[in-house]
Image (cartoon, rainbow, N blue to C red):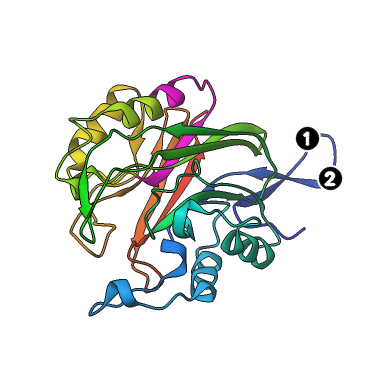
Amino acid sequence: MIPLPGFYTVPKKTQDTPYLIMSRFKVLQFNMQFGQVWDEAHPDLAPVDLEQTIAEIKRMDADIVLLQEVEHAEPNGIQRDPPPNFTRLKAALPGYDSYFSYPRPDPRELPFGIGLAIFSRSKLFDTSRLYLPSPPLEFNFNGETKTPTDRLMIGAKTTLGGHTVQVFNTHLLAFFMLKSSSAEHPQQREMVLHALQQSTLPTLLGGDFNVSGHETLVAQFAEAGFKTAQIETITWRRMPYVLDHVFYNRKLRCVNQAVIPTPASDHHLLRVEFEFAD
C-alpha cells in the first residue's frame, strides 16, 4: 500500500494487511484576496488570476485549507449565487470536501474581498456560521462617510486519524484602518474566543485577524489556552504586520510552520503542520 499524504502505514496486530493512521496533518491559512495578484507598483489595480490562486493552494498540498476573501464584493451588497470563485475552486480541488459562507448581506459592502471557505481532504460535518457585529465607526471612503459591515466566523468538524477535530475560520474587521483598534472595540475577538472555549475537541482556528499589534491578540488567546503557530514573520505585503494566524488548543501540537511568500495575493501563505498531543 502506498501511503497517502499526511499518513503512514502500520501492520495490524491480528492481520497482515496494513491500515492507515494519520501521523500529522497540514493546514494552509490564506487570505486569497479574491484572486487579485500582487503588484508592488499598483496593488489595487492588479489583475485577478484565480488560476494562480489555485496553483498555490495545490502547491501547498495541505489537508485542511482555510481561505478568506474568496469572492469580490458586488455593488449594493449583491451576493452572487452560486459564488463564482468558490465554484471554480471546488472544481479545481476535487479531492476536497468544502464549506463556504458569505457574510450577512449588506448594501454598505465595499468593493473588497468577502466570504470564507474551508476545504478538507476528509469529510466536513456540523458546519456553522457566526456573524460578528461591527461597531458604527464612521470613516471616509472616496469622499463619502461610511460605517463598517459585520464580519464572520465559520466552523466545521472533520475526522482525522480517528480524532474528531473542530475547525474554525474567521476574518475580523481591520480597526487599524479606521484609526481605532480591537482593544477599544473587543466584541468580535470576544465572540470568537467564546466559540473556541465551547469546544472540548482538538480545535484550530485560522484567519486574517486584522490586528496590527498582534501581541495583545496572542496574549488574549493564550490566556484562554490557544497558542498561535508563529509571530516572527510578517504575513501582509502592504504593511509590516502579522495579520494571519492559526491558533490551536492543547490537544494539538505544532511541529512545523512556514510563512511562504506568494505573488497570488497581498497576503502570504501560512502553512502549519500539526500532530495530536495524545
Secondary-structure class at tag 1: loop
Q: Which residue is mark 2?
A: 16
Residue drawn at the location 54% of the way across and 69% of the way down: 54
For the question of whether residue 151 can be seen, the reply is: yes
For the question of whether residue 30 can be seen, the reply is: no
Left or right: where does residue 84 sit relative to residue 15? Answer: left
> Tag 1: residue type?
Lys
Residue drawn at the location 85% of the way across and 40% of the way down: 15
Name the image quarter holding residue 238: bottom left
> Looking at the picture, does residue 106 appear above or below residue 93?
above
Left or right: where does residue 199 sit relative to residue 4? Answer: left
Neighbour tally class for label 1: few under 14, some 14-19, many 20 plus, Cα within 10 Å = few
Assess whether residue 122 is covered by the magenta stretch: no
Q: Which mark is residue 54?
A: none
Residue drawn at the location 43% of the way across and 43% of the way down: 206
Assess whether residue 197 is covered by the magenta stretch: yes
> Tag 2: residue type?
Asp
The front one of 121 and 99 is 99
Give the residue at the far left of this rendering.
179
Q: Which residue is mark 1?
A: 13
The front one of 229 and 129 is 129
Point out residue 64 in the picture as x, y percentages from the top left corner: 56, 50
